[in-house]
Image (cartoon, rainbow, N blue to C red):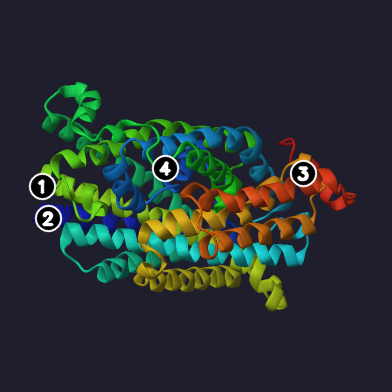
Amino acid sequence: MENVDYIVLASYFLVLIGIGVWAYFRVRSSADFYTAGGNLPWWLSGISHHVSGYSGVVFVAYAAIAYTHGLTIYIWWAVGIAIAMIGTTFFIAPRWARLRSKTGIQSPTEYLLTRYNLPTQQVMAWSGVIVKLFDIGAKWAAIGILLNVFTGLSIGSGIAISGVVTLIYITIGGLWADVVNDLFSFIIQFVSGIIMFVVILQHLGDGMGGVVSMWDQLPAANSQPYNDPYTFGFSIGFMVIAFFSYSGGTWNLATRFISSSSGQVARKASMLSMILYLIWPFILFFPMFAAPIFFPDLEDPTQSYSLMAIEFLPAGITGLLLASLFSNTLSMVSSDANTISAVITRDIMPVFMKKIKGFSQSRMLAVARVTTFVFILITIIIAWNSSSFGGVIGLIITWFSALLGPISVPMILGLLPRFKHSDSTAALLSIFGGLTTFALFKLAFAVSYGWELSGPIITSLVIYVGYAYIVKKPVSEEVEELISSLNLDK
């Protein structure tokens, strides 16, 4: 990069520090730190939900899929998420906001104590924390790869730098720092993404017609909506996982709804995020689709987007693009860390430290910050060893997606009246059934990519839903009251 690119990147870091300092003075309690006091406006919550749904992984792992397989990544990933979020918007998002306003929860797993019981809550909390260690580790590895291509820094050094920056601003600023960074991240990403889109169109030489004519210069399979191993079945499996993930099975996304002031506000936030997923990713992916035309036969397709940016963007804009990629990843990682910290301090630590429930607001805030710091530190260590888990793509698509389903099924469906008869036994059976399926498919049986991804969540769904309709145990008055209270804002 040129000197001006480094200046742009350094300016972004200063903005991040400024956001952290600004947010620091807004945070007075753990409720402010974890849920912004329940005062997020719908447009900020919606943008934050959208930006928190992807990171530098899109420009590394998914860029590689766009390079090798073409349009299918937009179809099964972006369009799949948009379709899945229809259910999120109308059935799930409003219930998260009502849950906070009626029960005062600060973490997504806090309500599970009442909905099921303590052992079930602890299994889901611990499982989710472990899964997130892998997921966030992959995101650090992705930003390390991006920095390596743009600046020549070693991947380990890139992981360390990005980790330290996040450690500072999220530890002091909490959720407010996170969502404001999401807003700045989206603005930077929008500007740099449009510039990149226009520049690539100019080099294709056919104006806006290049959006269509480009495919004639690529392998025929690259223009197909489904390109093996990303088949229609794989797409359906991912869509099911996306529903549970973007409804709140991915806990940081649940926090965006929990932090909304009402169910109506949460629904509007979810709808905005859904629309953005349908439109914006195609513009982001377009340079990745075109990369084989300009860089044929790349040995490492994960570098395709970075190489396109270095080749075609003018000085200054390259730094802006890298800032947007950095911002995206730091935003998502800090969002995850904030929510995981809430789960640890609100749901896990009180089991081992009874006196923590009596801590003052200032002391709980200190505990929240220390927990966030330690969690991020552990994920950085995992990122340094990402190759042991199949690299970035292996961590994100296989490990995280497959393990997410079994944990999220009882969490999301537990909010709905239709499944009120599924108790703690149903929840535990569905979790362990899904995890067992994952282990069998990973270690004992050779199955297709689609089954490896969707098998665990299908198993969990069959067990959890089947239990609700077959066993039909009586529902306790406490659970009945909890679920019924989520039907309306008042």
Mark 1 / mark 3, whichever is N-terminal: 1
Q: Is residue 105 visible?
A: yes
Q: Which residue in the protein does label 4 denote?
A: 230
Q: Which residue in the protein does label 1 denote?
A: 315
Kindly indicate whether the residue at mark 3 contacts the one at mark 1 (C-beta within 8 angstroms): no
| Front: mark 4 or 3 | 4
Instruction: Compute the Cα span from label 1 to label 4.
Output: 37 Å
- Looking at the rendered structure, the kind of residue marked 1 is Ala
Q: Which residue in the protein does label 2 denote?
A: 1
- Looking at the rendered structure, the kind of residue marked 2 is Met
The reply, left or right, for residue 323 in relation to residue 307 is right
What element does badge 1 sit on? loop
Kindly indicate whether the residue at mark 2 contacts the one at mark 1 (C-beta within 8 angstroms): yes
- Looking at the rendered structure, the kind of residue marked 4 is Tyr
Q: Nearer the viewer, residue 33 or 207?
A: 207
Mark 4 / mark 2, whichever is N-terminal: 2
Q: Residues within 10 Å of mark 4 (few under 14, many from 20)?
A: some
Instruction: Compute the Cα span from label 1 to label 3.
Output: 56 Å
Q: Locate residue 92: give its quadrant.
A: top right
Q: Which mark is residue 419?
A: 3
What element does badge 2 sit on? loop
At x 31% / y 67%, what residue is drawn? 159
The reply, left or right, for residue 429 in relation to residue 161 is right
- Answer above or below: position of 129 versus 179: below
Instruction: Compute the Cα span from label 4 to label 2.
Output: 35 Å
Instruction: Compute the Cα span from label 2 to label 3.
Output: 55 Å
Q: Residues within 10 Å of mark 3 (few under 14, many from 20)?
A: some
Q: Nearer the viewer, residue 417 or 226?
A: 226
